[in-house]
Image (tube, rainbow, N blue to C red):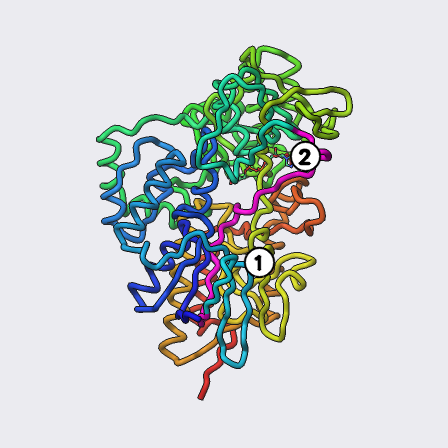
């Protein structure tokens, strides 16, 4: 059995940087185990037409090395999936990471031996590894949510999930295609598939507020400027609660005079992107202010959509703006003006079952050759709980998280010594520009291991009390926010039948979170117990 200092699970943004950090800064012997046949993580699997990051390329990139940053040229304001995949391959090769990654290897079991203070890792290839540390870099949105629709085996067409899109592009041209789901992914894939399909039927359960991306090709001048602004952008992201390179508004929407308010919304709409939600300071906490944003977007949608029935369906909101992850789009609403696109409200007419050549709803039949599920993920806990993780005293993660995940800082779990989670439940990650949260987590974990080596500690474990406190903190941080009002949201586990309905990420902001993590480290990892073999 091969032994490593650390095994990292996953070769996406998190795993690659963690490998580099532990190898270069601490000289550890590290191995990444990765299910896919190449690097990319989320950006390996989500290769559906139109797949693109919502965060701007100049920010959605590693900042731990200025050289890496300057040597890579993004071509558009928002990076496409193929370009992000290429970028991660470039990083992997530039830092010579590939030799320490084993691809096509899915971790099935992790078992801790308290006597030896060692983890055993089992894989689908029947391999066995041992290591002192396990670092989960499995991603937050990596376990596809495939709703169960009866009679699936009767359907003679093709079925795809956007989160598990085949490497060989399916032939979609001139086909009758259905798409279920209108989240961030549906909003990206729908306009692209509409261009290819003979007919596209979109099955919508809940409409989504989308803001234009206003994507564009980057000029050489803009690329040069991004390099000049490296430190400035880094500082802005450091200060921003979501890790984005802009400043927060300090103006209340409801307190702003209506003409000025609309002018600010118009400006933000024209600029496009995720910063729209930061136009005012109180959109996520004040109902009247939030209504001004919702109403602004509803008016925009109604102006774009020609068919009033379709416009009504696209604006029939049951949740406040921003309570679900706000998507951004390129021609999403315009797509519904195409003759080959139909929108179906499956809240009023739910899907009943598959049939040989399509699906049936309670009131209708739809003929389909291809059905695409853009139905999201069992987010934040799905992939972790799909592995058999057994900690101290034979405790199973699945069992102790039955009523919801409990972690300290999203990084450590009581009873699971020497197991670190990157972007785990209780981390702010999914509410932020992910690479900023990932870099913070990777560095915190790396420095914690460094501290252990310096002190000859052979295990670290968070206390139950510290994890209980942090879990309370997570609930406290969200209590005034509209996040809690979107009942189907994956932030709350609301999209997965049977999943505990608990708000999972930390909503207090990455800037505040970083300060808390730093304080814990400065206080000798307060809330953690170390052991030393004498
Ligand atoms: P999301 O945001 O979870 O969206 C999934 C969509 O699929 C959403 O419209 C759901 O409707 C719909 N859905 C989910 N389950 C069903 C079933 N059973 N029947 C019908 N419709 C369903 O996932 P995305 O992939 O779009 O985005 C995930 C994140 O990726 C995103 O937030 C970014 O961070 C990147 P619902 O709203 O639940 O009624």
For the N terminus, the image quarter is: bottom left
Which-is-in-front pick, marks 2 and 1?
A: 2
Of all residues, the one furthest to the right in this rendering is 362
As drawn, is 221 to the left or to the right of 440? Answer: left
Of all residues, the one furthest to the bottom in this rendering is 534
Can residue 527 be seen here? The reply is no
Q: Is residue 526 magenta?
A: no
Secondary structure beneath dot 2 equals: helix
Quadrant of residue 47 in the image? top left
Asked if residue 140 is positioned above or below residue 450 in the image, the reply reads above
Residue in the image at 37% along x and 76% along y: 453
Start-end of magenta stretch? 130-155
Judging depth in this view, the residue of 373 and 159 nearest the camera is 159
Rendered image: mark on residue 153: 2
As drawn, is 41 to the left or to the right of 454? Answer: right
- Horizontal and vertical percent position of residue 448: 41, 69
- Horizontal and vertical percent position of residue 132: 44, 72
Residue in the image at 35% along x and 32% along y: 77
| Ligand 1 in which quarter | top right
Residue in the image at 36% along x and 45% along y: 236
- Horizontal and vertical percent position of residue 62: 34, 48
Categorize mark 2 by other alpha carbons within 10 Å: few (<14), some (14-19), many (20+). few
Q: How many marks?
A: 2
Task: From the image, tell me which residue sits under label 1.
Answer: 387
Categorize mark 1 by other alpha carbons within 10 Å: few (<14), some (14-19), many (20+). some
- Horizontal and vertical percent position of residue 297: 55, 24
Quadrant of residue 151 in the image? top right
Secondary structure beneath dot 1 equals: loop
As drawn, is 73 to the left or to the right of 534? Answer: left
> In terms of sequence position, does the residue under pointer 2 or pointer 1 come before the other?
2
Can residue 276 be seen here? The reply is yes
Instruction: Name the main secondary structure of what is drawn in magenta.
Output: loop
């Amino acid at each position: 059995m091969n032994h490593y200092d650390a095994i990292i699970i996953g070769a996406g943004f998190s795993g690659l940087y963690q490998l580099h950090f532990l190898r270069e800064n601490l000289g550890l012997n590290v191995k990444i185990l990765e299910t896919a046949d190449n690097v990319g993580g989320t950006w390996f699997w989500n290769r559906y037409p139109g797949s693109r990051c919502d965060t701007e390329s100049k920010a959605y990139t590693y900042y731990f090395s200025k050289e890496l940053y300057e040597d890579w040229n993004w071509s558009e304001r928002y990076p496409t999936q193929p370009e992000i995949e290429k970028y991660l391959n470039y990083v992997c090769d530039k830092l010579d990471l590939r030799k320490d990654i084993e691809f096509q290897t899915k971790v099935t079991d992790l078992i801790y031996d308290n006597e030896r203070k060692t983890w055993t890792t089992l894989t689908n290839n029947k391999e066995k590894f041992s290591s002192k540390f396990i670092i989960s870099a499995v991603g937050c949105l990596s376990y596809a949510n495939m709703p169960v629709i009866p009679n699936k085996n009767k359907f003679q067409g093709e079925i795809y999930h956007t989160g598990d899109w085949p490497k060989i592009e399916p032939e979609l041209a001139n086909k009758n295609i259905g798409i279920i789901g209108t989240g961030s992914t549906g909003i990206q894939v729908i306009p692209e598939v509409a261009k290819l399909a003979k007919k596209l039927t979109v099955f919508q359960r809940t409409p989504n507020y989308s803001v234009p991306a206003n994507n564009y090709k980057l000029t050489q001048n803009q690329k040069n400027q991004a390099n000049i602004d490296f430190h400035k952008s880094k500082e802005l992201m450091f200060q921003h609660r979501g890790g984005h390179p802009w400043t927060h508004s300090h103006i209340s929407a409801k307190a702003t005079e209506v003409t000025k308010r609309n002018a600010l919304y118009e400006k933000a709409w024209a600029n496009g992107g995720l910063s729209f939600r930061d136009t005012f300071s109180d959109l996520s906490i004040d109902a009247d202010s939030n209504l001004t944003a919702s109403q602004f977007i509803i008016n925009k949608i109604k102006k774009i959509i020609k068919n009033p029935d379709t416009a009504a369906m696209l604006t029939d909101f049951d949740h406040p703006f921003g309570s679900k992850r706000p998507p951004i789009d390129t021609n999403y609403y315009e797509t519904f003006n195409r003759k080959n696109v139909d929108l179906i409200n499956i809240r009023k007419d739910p899907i009943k079952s598959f049939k040989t050549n399509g699906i049936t709803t309670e009131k209708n039949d739809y003929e389909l050759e291809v059905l695409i599920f853009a139905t999201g993920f069992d987010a934040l806990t799905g992939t972790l709980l799909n592995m058999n993780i057994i900690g101290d005293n034979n405790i199973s993660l699945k069992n102790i998280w039955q009523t919801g995940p409990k972690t300290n800082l999203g990084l450590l779990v009581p009873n699971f010594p020497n197991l670190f989670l990157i972007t785990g439940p209780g981390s702010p990650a999914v509410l932020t520009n992910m690479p900023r949260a990932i870099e913070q987590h990777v560095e915190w974990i790396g420095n914690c291991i460094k501290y252990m080596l310096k002190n000859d500690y052979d295990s670290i474990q968070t206390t139950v009390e510290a994890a209980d406190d942090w879990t309370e903190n997570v609930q406290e941080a969200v209590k005034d926010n509209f996040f809690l009002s979107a009942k189907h949201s994956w932030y709350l586990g609301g999209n997965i039948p049977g999943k505990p309905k608990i708000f999972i990420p930390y909503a207090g902001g990455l800037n505040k979170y970083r300060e808390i993590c730093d304080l814990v480290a400065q206080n000798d990892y307060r809330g953690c117990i170390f052991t030393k073999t004498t």
